[in-house]
Amino acid sequence: MFDNIKEKVYEANIQLYKQGLVPLTWGNVSARVEDYIIIKPSGVEYEKMSPQDMVVLDLAGKVIDGKLKPSSDTKTHLEIYHSCSQIYSVCHTHSKYATSYAQAGIPIKAMGTTHADYFFGDIPCTRALTYDEVESDYELNTGKVIAETFKDKDWLQIPAVLVKQHGPFTWGGSADKGGLDAVENAVVLEEIAQINYQTMLINPAAVLLPDYVLNKHYYRKHGAGAYYGQKK
Amino acid sequence: MFDNIKEKVYEANIQLYKQGLVPLTWGNVSARVEDYIIIKPSGVEYEKMSPQDMVVLDLAGKVIDGKLKPSSDTKTHLEIYHSCSQIYSVCHTHSKYATSYAQAGIPIKAMGTTHADYFFGDIPCTRALTYDEVESDYELNTGKVIAETFKDKDWLQIPAVLVKQHGPFTWGGSADKGGLDAVENAVVLEEIAQINYQTMLINPAAVLLPDYVLNKHYYRKHGAGAYYGQKK
Amino acid sequence: MFDNIKEKVYEANIQLYKQGLVPLTWGNVSARVEDYIIIKPSGVEYEKMSPQDMVVLDLAGKVIDGKLKPSSDTKTHLEIYHSCSQIYSVCHTHSKYATSYAQAGIPIKAMGTTHADYFFGDIPCTRALTYDEVESDYELNTGKVIAETFKDKDWLQIPAVLVKQHGPFTWGGSADKGGLDAVENAVVLEEIAQINYQTMLINPAAVLLPDYVLNKHYYRKHGAGAYYGQKK
Amino acid sequence: MFDNIKEKVYEANIQLYKQGLVPLTWGNVSARVEDYIIIKPSGVEYEKMSPQDMVVLDLAGKVIDGKLKPSSDTKTHLEIYHSCSQIYSVCHTHSKYATSYAQAGIPIKAMGTTHADYFFGDIPCTRALTYDEVESDYELNTGKVIAETFKDKDWLQIPAVLVKQHGPFTWGGSADKGGLDAVENAVVLEEIAQINYQTMLINPAAVLLPDYVLNKHYYRKHGAGAYYGQKK
């Protein structure tokens, strides 16, 4: 079932490790196909994992295909898919600079064009989960606190969030990339997190990117007037 | 003797170098089997080392098998095994961020879920050894000061320590991994050391992880109620 | 057309990725031959790119040869070539330390001989572009603000600039290297950016390199009296 | 002439690049044999260099064998050999953390056992060269200012120096390693520079290593009572 997509989702998960975003078995990527999601199994070493180990679930979270348990973060992924029907991939890492901002509880401000090329505004940081939220259904509530953070934001224009004291989640809107667009956003998020960190240490008074540059760079790559890249 | 375990301990030592935790000949991993330990020889280059170079000692420190001298840190390893009978592997590195905390004399506080997934509380830093402790039996006393630091702690729930102005030791409780679990803990320790360092520079007022999140993440992966990973 | 140069420009672009200056499809290198420039196509993955994908334009910006769209930064490259006829290559990256200085809006001061070996003075940072400059012809005006920054400087003696809140551009004066000299300057720029960053954190009162050492090191490698390297 | 040593010196120079201490053609290693030194040629790319490119000079600096010009830093190497007859190898890099301390004009203090394993005390930073010293015979005077810094120090117990606003030189006393011991010291110097940098940012009040630990660790690896490593 969905063998072609399993292959892609497998490859997207492998990229987490190859791009240096995670060590060991950390991180997970999922992709949505129709009313199903395909996700990495929980706690399997990247070197021992194969495409057939990917797990297929319906959007209610029921395993439809696969011998292994899905990622322990599956409910968070599902809640993100439920919150925005245009999302087709979700990625979670503990990449070091983005996670540092999450631990610091501080958003990643738009301070340069590297940021503006991918994210149309600051990367927000969620509030902390309450005791009850952690105790009752932790992974689901992690998804809900992300959704709460995005209730007045456009998910696809800012495809990343920092979960406070935890780490980043990113997502993407391409139905045919098997999760690779969410991974690409995770790569860029880590890049801009490191650059902002260094910017702040060089000049604590460094100013934000003006809106007109944010607009220019974002729309150079996105939307009807985009002129970056080749015609599809 | 113990050829199978020598192979594993060899591989665990090689991982120190491959994972970037140490340059040159630095670092050492041992594993316990029954009443013996198998440990890396002292000062042998990783590229020239073979599984048969691993040294077997009894728990009193007598070499039982092997042509080479064991690691100069052997007595520290032995003292850790003596202090907690559930420990089956010990690893010592000078990984850069963990060693920086050791030199700073400051524990690595639990500030995020990355930490909580592996360590149930702060990673403590020992006191400095006294002149007499250094002069009389340095490596043994390094083990004793680690044991002193853990006299009211659970070794297996916090499988790492910073020896002041020296560097980290980690350990593990798996009898069948030939030291790889201690190495995994060393990888994660370095990861959280770097993340905490960056967190502190981003926001010196960043707060500790609430106990209920520490509990949730730790017990998601450890103990009877764990649901991370696949069934064994 | 210019197949030999396309091969070189391709290789120079590939070096951006291999040297760790950029992830994904970021960055671009061009080279000038007679009254033409050869430049990377826009938004093509490094692993899928071939020498034949390089795009040839005349100096007015008209595509002369190539099936793909040229880099979206092409007008900035052209404006640099127009501003200094001795320039034969241009390179743009978002390398992490140089971009951090660009975001901080702070020049990279000459603080050591590593800097003086390649750059005869501080690496300047441009002013920010105005709203009108961004809206009217962004990439062209990026070139113009670079030219404005160099109106009293020698382009070839300081072959690098930081575009404020954007990132670095570098260039070179060798007609036969197909862009590799601009890439080499980008590698060194990133190196000195990181070293200056660390210098500043170690000692905020660290002093600038005296002019007589700047002179010595720069002219050891450049100009008629150079004695570094082999005779050409 | 000295083909065997040329091979070793070549390999030692290649290690500079492989260990990440230098990019491009930077850095140089020499070794002494009897009254000759073998050194890297000036400005040759590592990938194009071969053992036969190594240059042989007598201790007065006259080229005895080799078609290429020796490293532009040759006179500095020679002055170090002249200053201490027990030195058999010299290495110069612009490694990033050590160079940052050189630019900051601040010695690398002994703050941990990683330092004490290789260096019996602080790594000193030279004074700046005067205008006359730079103008008259720069590379020779760089050697002389290093010698001045070591006039009351033991070269072999502290085999490294920071040349102010320039970078590190290291050396070694092994007649048979073809420069590899000086490279090893350069690797360790960079390691302790980074660890000290991070220590200082974690805790600006971190204290120096007590002398009795410095003694213990240094003499565990050096001198008649050493017990680290295998018997020679």
Image (spheres, coloured by chain):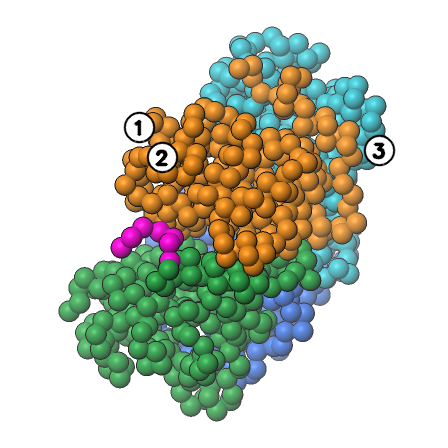
Chain colours: A cyan, B orange, C blue, D green
* Image location of residue D125, percent across then percent down: 52, 75
Callout 3 crowding tier (Cα within 10 Å): few <14, some 14–19, many ≥20: few
Q: Does D186 appear above or below A172?
A: below
Q: What residue do we see at 55% from left, 11% from top?
A: A66
SS of the residue under disc 3 = loop
- Name the foreground residue: D116 vs D199: D116
Which chain is indicated by disc 2? B
Q: Amino acid at mark 1?
A: Met
Say which mark, if any, is on residue A152. 3
> Left or right: where does residue B4 sit relative to residue A183?
left
- The kind of residue on which mark 3 rests is Asp
Left or right of B48 on screen, residue D140: right
Q: CA distance from mark 1 to mark 2?
A: 8 Å
**Residue B178 shows up from this direction:** no
Residue D224 vertical position relative to residue B40 in the rendered view, above or below? below
Magenta stretch: dominant secondary structure: loop
> Does mark 3 fall on the same chain as mark 2?
no
Chain hosting mark 3: A
Which residue is pictured at 80% across the width and 30% down the height?
Answer: A129
Q: Which residues are magenta?
A: D226-232
